[in-house]
Structure formats: C-alpha cells, structure tokens
Amino acid sequence: MPVTTRSQARGCGELYGNIDDRIPTYATMYPVFCTTNIPPKVLDWFIDEAYRGILLSEEDSDPPGAPCILQTTDLSSITHGSRKPMSDFESPFLNYTDNEIRDWMEHHSCPGFAEATFTILDQLTIDEGTCRVGYCNSFPDPQPDTRMFTTIPYNDLSVRVTIELGEISWCEIVEETEGTFTRNDPAAAK
C-alpha cells in the first residue's frame, strides 16, 4: 500500500475544525484530480478554500462532503477527505485529459464518493488559483455533456453539492457560467 494511503488510513493530518470527514460517518467524498504536479502549499490552500466556501454557504454546521484529492486509484482504500498538511506526491492522473478523467470516473464508482461531478487541479490552479469542474452522465448518452466550467476553490464544493443533490442541473450551472465563478457570483450561491 502506498505511503499516502497508509497515512490516510491511520487518520493522520489536520482536521478542518471539528468536521468529521470520514466515509463511515456518511460524508461524501468529492473527487479532485491533479493532472499536473501541484505543490503541497497550493493543495493546502485548495482544501482551506473549499471548506471555507461550503461552511459559509450552508445553514447547518456540518458540510455534506469533503474534498478528496486523489493520490491513489484505489478508492476503497480512502477513509476520509484530504487533510492538511498535504505531502508532495505523484498523481496517478498526470497528463490525463478532461475526457480521460470523465471516463475514469464513470468506470470507477465507489460508495461514499460523488458520482456526477469531479474537479481538476492543473497548471491554471498554480498560475491563476482556479480549478475546473466537470460532469459525468449517470446514464449512457450518445452525446454526453463534456463542458467544463472554471471556478475558484472557494466555490468548488458548494457548486458540486448542489449539482449532486439535484438542487440545480449541470446544464443550468454551465449555461449561467461565463468566465470564472468568484466569491460574489450569484450563480455560485444557488
């Protein structure tokens, strides 16, 4: 088992406040794919911002999910969301395209993990502080929606949760998106 998986299984890492982000407590893991080598300080910042955004957008104090930066392809070995401090690691998804990530998601569903949405951290994350969100069709579709939208980590979980829970459709969110969601974007607050 890789070192990163062993440390995850032992529960190492900083919890985000008092949030219980373990799969056995029914927190949904929201998969985050790194398609380039992302420095640990950027990953730590992503985790902070993703939690900050979901905590400020939810009325109750328990967020419905946790960001899970994938360091392994064995989803069943993951027991909780990503925690700080993140270590340097080589992503198993280096140089994957959006469609390769989407295809991987559609063929590797796992209990406790979101199935409709995914986030990609890439060179734009390092250069501009943005991430990209994609959608997986839950049923075979001859013309799947392969559009991606760019957002900031602060909005990542809050937007993905609303899509996963069916509060807003993927088409609605993508059609309303022009450019990058910011903290003041009303579409991100839905």
Image (tube, rainbow, N blue to C red):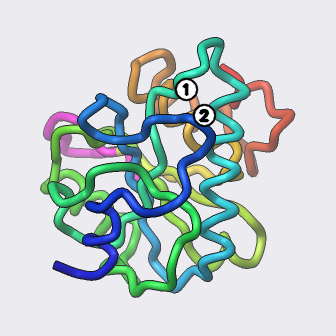
Quarter holding the C terminus is: top right
Q: Position of residue 187 (x, y in %)?
A: 71, 27
Spot occupied by residue 29 in the image (x, y as percentages of width and height): 36, 44
Q: Nearer the viewer, residue 169 or 141?
A: 169
For residue 185, the mark is: none
What is the count of numbered marks? Answer: 2
Residue at 50 percent across and 85 percent down: it is: 88
Which residue is nearer to you in this view: 21 or 163?
21
Amino acid type indicated by mark 2: Glu
Which quarter of the picture shows residue 32? bottom left
Figure quadrant of the N terminus: bottom left
Q: Which residue is mark 1?
A: 172
Q: Which residues are magenta?
A: 136-147
Q: Secondary structure at mark 2?
A: helix
Asked if the magenta segment contains residue 143, the reply would be yes
Q: Is residue 190 visible?
A: yes
Question: Horizontal and vertical percent for residue 181?
Answer: 74, 43
Near-viewer residue (12 or 108): 12
Q: Which element carries disc 1, helix, strand or loop?
A: helix
Task: Relative to 119, say whether 64 is above or below.
Answer: above
User: Which residue corresponds to the image point at 24% horizontal and 35% vertical from the top-left?
Assistant: 24
Query: Residue 62, image x and y in percent?
Result: 53, 23
Label 1 amino acid?
A: Glu
Can residue 3 be found in the magenta stretch? no
Q: CA distance from mark 1 to mark 2?
A: 5 Å
Location of residue 122 by image quarter: bottom right
**Residue topped by disc 2:** 175
Determine whether label 1 and label 2 are within 8 Å by CB.
yes
Q: Residues within 10 Å of mark 2 (few under 14, many from 20)?
A: few
The secondary structure making up most of the magenta span is: loop
